[in-house]
Amino acid sequence: MTKEVLLVTGAGQIGLAIVRRMGYGKKIVIATRRPEKAQETLTTLTNAGFDAVVIEMDMASRESIVNAVQKAQEFGPIKMLVNAAGVSPSQASIEQILKVDLLGTAILLEEVRKVIAPGGVGVTISSQSGWRMKQLTPEEDRALAMTPTEQLLDLDILQPENIVNTLHAYQLAKRCNEKRVMYEAVEWGKRGARINDIAPGIIVTPLAVDEFNGIRGDFYKNMFAKCPAGRPGTTDEVADVAELLMSERAQFITGSTFLIDGGATASYYYGPLQPGLETGMEEGKQ
């Protein structure tokens, strides 16, 4: 029997938490660059009664993304997308961040939009980091939102000489994700489908625990200690937001970004995390 497909990119804890909320009764297709690394996620879902499979997809390759979307369609019509793939500023070069987090997301949203089933819905995971950089001009925001994907990395704003470091590249990528979702919401709407963005703050995952114990650990701990919530978030709290956005209760919500960071961004602009009040904030605007 053909099932509706939930396509999830990446095999991390945020994607898994969302899939466990929304994947019942669907064929869950986990698309990841290293399928062998996704076996634990696959086992967790299978043991919980979900119908899941892993396929290979490299977010840095248009061909790989197109092939993965086609492969997912072999299981049934794609009804849901959870884009949770990406690399962090401490994991990758400027070039890789732009290819994976920025361009890869833009291509994925474009390719899934071409085939998304009527009534379909998607969420993409960006970051609070996109809210913490120099304000872009309306023209720059529009270019990030609407430039054809094959020309996106040719924009002046994305040239290496205009990017300070990997953190700056990451901020630009996440800003582009949010603007791209706004543009794609218009296009997805033509197919009767919706797409939204979630911008998490510090969420406890195995990767985050490594960061807490790494060279920026004190900075991260200070950030969540001095945000209004006074703690980091959990993957289930991100899934709470995704569950609403992907449900029938959110039919009037599309093209939006939902910041879920315990108030860290609010504190960054208007509270004790303001640059100048905090040592090292300019170095670590995340």
Image (cartoon, rainbow, N blue to C red):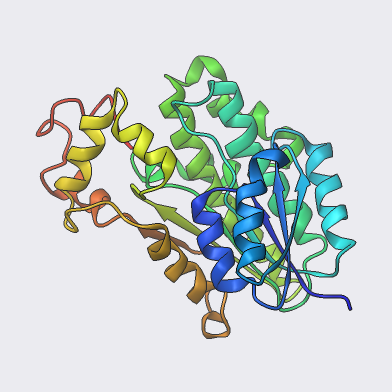
Describe residue 161's horizontal placement relative to residue 266 as left or right: right
Which x, y percent locates residue 217?
26, 31
Which x, y percent locates residue 176?
54, 43
The quarter in which the N terminus is drawn is bottom right
**Residue 255 appears in the rendering:** no
At horizontal 9% and vertical 34% (from top left) the residue drawn is: 277
The image shows a total of numbered marks equal to 0
Which x, y percent locates residue 220?
26, 37
User: Outermost residue, front direction?
Assistant: 47
Up the image or down, 61 lies above or below 251; here it is above
Describe residue 208's horizontal placement relative to residue 282 as left or right: right
User: Which quarter of the figure has residue 120?
Assistant: bottom right
At horizontal 13% and vertical 26% (from top left) the residue drawn is: 279
User: Outermost residue, bottom direction?
Assistant: 249
Q: Nearer the viewer, residue 220 or 194?
A: 220
Up the image or down, 39 lies above or below 181; here it is above
Describe residue 186's horizontal placement relative to residue 165 as left or right: right
The quarter in which the C terminus is drawn is top left
**Residue 19 appears in the rendering:** yes
Q: Nearer the viewer, residue 190 or 223?
A: 223
User: Which quarter of the figure has residue 262?
Assistant: bottom left
Up the image or down, 57 lies above or below 215; here it is below
Which x, y percent locates residue 162?
49, 19
Describe residue 171's horizontal placement relative to residue 30 as left or right: left
User: Outermost residue, top direction?
Assistant: 161
At horizontal 59% and vertical 65% (from top left) the residue drawn is: 19
At horizontal 53% and vertical 24% (from top left) the residue drawn is: 92
Up the image or down, 153 lies above or below 5; here it is above
